[in-house]
Amino acid sequence: MAVAVIAIRSAFPTTTAAVAAVRPSFLVAAGATSSLRRRRIRSPGWPVTASMSSSSSAAAAAEHKAGAWYAVPDLSLRDHRFAVPLDHSSPSAPTITVFAREVVAAGKEDLPLPYLLFLQGGPGFESPRPTEASGWIKKACEEYRVVLLDQRGTGLSTPLTTSSLSQITSAAEQVEYLKHFRADSIVKDAEFIRLRLVPDAKPWTVLGQSYGGFCAVTYLSFAPEGLKSVLLTGGLPPLGSACTADTVYRACFKQVQQQNEKYYARYPQDIQVIHEVVKYLNESEGGGVSLPSGGRLTPKMLQCLGLSGLGSGGGFERLHYLFERVWDPILVPGAKKTISYYFLRQFEMWLGFDQNPIYALLHESIYCQGSSSKWSAHNIGSECESLFDPIKAIKDGRPVYFTGEMVFPCIFDEIHALRPLKETAHMLADKEDWPPLYDVSVLNNNKVPVAAAVYYEDMYVNFNIAKETASQISGIRLWITNEYMHSGIRDGGSHVYDHLMGLLNGKKPLF
């Protein structure tokens, strides 16, 4: 049953260390630097208020290019490209492109609507590409101009792919480049865009889904003056210690275990099917079979299907139907049993690590402030080895458990496109000097209206951790529900959006 509660404030320690940016030698400064006149600076790279001088028009034109309006059914869209510094704290930094798509209801192109910025989950995934007016976007466009931001490194925002990263030949220089693609830089991009896109640089509303919610809490910490209100859907990050990854994965492995139990209760016939697949892979030469792109499917990699299959609406069904097509039919009597090309190709498409390497490279760093992750998921997983070892599960006659939102070192061996990034991944896992992402003292004194959907059975953002974080954000209003899983904004977008807006405008009771 869905309930709404109001959060309680309490003291919580925060990390305040910051690290100076080091520009790798292969980068050359390019493009115009910002001509904004900054009146107050919270910390390096954070513009608080700004105004354009008359001499800055040429620089502004170089920094922001807007396209013409175009249409999909019931929506009008316009593309914006911004030249932003790779490193916002360095005035001589080279620039990258950040792309944002402005969306309004058809016929409202010229109306003075307030702005709503959407921050996508991930890290490392681009914003939605609307094909029609539907879901939460349709609902939001009744009142807002929606800005769909491709976070830096994704979509059309100077995308970081396995091929583009190959231009940087040194692993150390790749690390220096990638360190600028976390939430702190994403929020600085958002402020850069707001000051140039929103009339009179007024504050805007932000809707953050999952990792996008983590970014929104960073926004609340360091640039609350840019925010009118904040909506969070499955996106309350862990606060506190220098690296919260271990805490997160200990909680998430328990939730993943529960999701596995639910899956096999729904599809008990899959216990034997998956046993047979794991046996086949384990007994194959090298402990696995080749994937179409040149990688290798092993029992450990097979377990990664839980990332998409166990934690979102309809995931159980999609996972079950995937295993219906795992074997090739025997067309000729006596032919060797083989895993089908269909299954192998679908497996690669399900993971998508090769297309979105930021997720694989930086996922654990989103939990780091002044400390390293040291492959936290792998280490915590070893504590649960008796439950998650696929070979042992078969020997014990138990179901083979899938894993969840965890990145393991083995993917940089078994996914062909990621192999050149293996050294970089290990260096990122050891990197300690990550700057702060949250300021708990600011959150304790928050004045920005915030409403958050907290999903009781969320496999990716643990319910108890989310509640603890909420207790640190003054004035937050929570909607705690088991009606949706982590994908609530996708599965019931208009209802989720309406409920959160109702909490903000007083139409929904707090209890």
Image: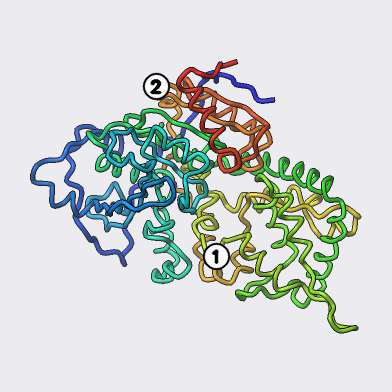
Q: CA distance from mark 1 to mark 2?
A: 41 Å
Q: Residue at x 53, y 29 (%)?
A: 452
Q: Residue furthest left?
A: 55
Query: Residue 21 shows which numbered tag?
Result: none
Residue 305 screen position, x and y as percent: 69, 57
What's the residue at 16%, 46% (across, down)? 35
Local crowd size for mark 1, using a 10 Å CA cut-off: few (<14), some (14–19), many (≥20): many
Residue assigned mark 1: 354
Q: Which residue is mark 2?
A: 447
Q: Is residue 143 above or below residue 431?
A: above
Q: Is residue 252 above or below residue 495?
A: below
Q: Quadrant of residue 442?
A: top left
Q: Which element carries disc 2, helix, strand or loop?
A: loop
Amino acid type, residue under disc 1 in the picture: Asp
Nearer to us in this view, 7 or 17? 7
**Nearer the observer, 373 or 271:** 271
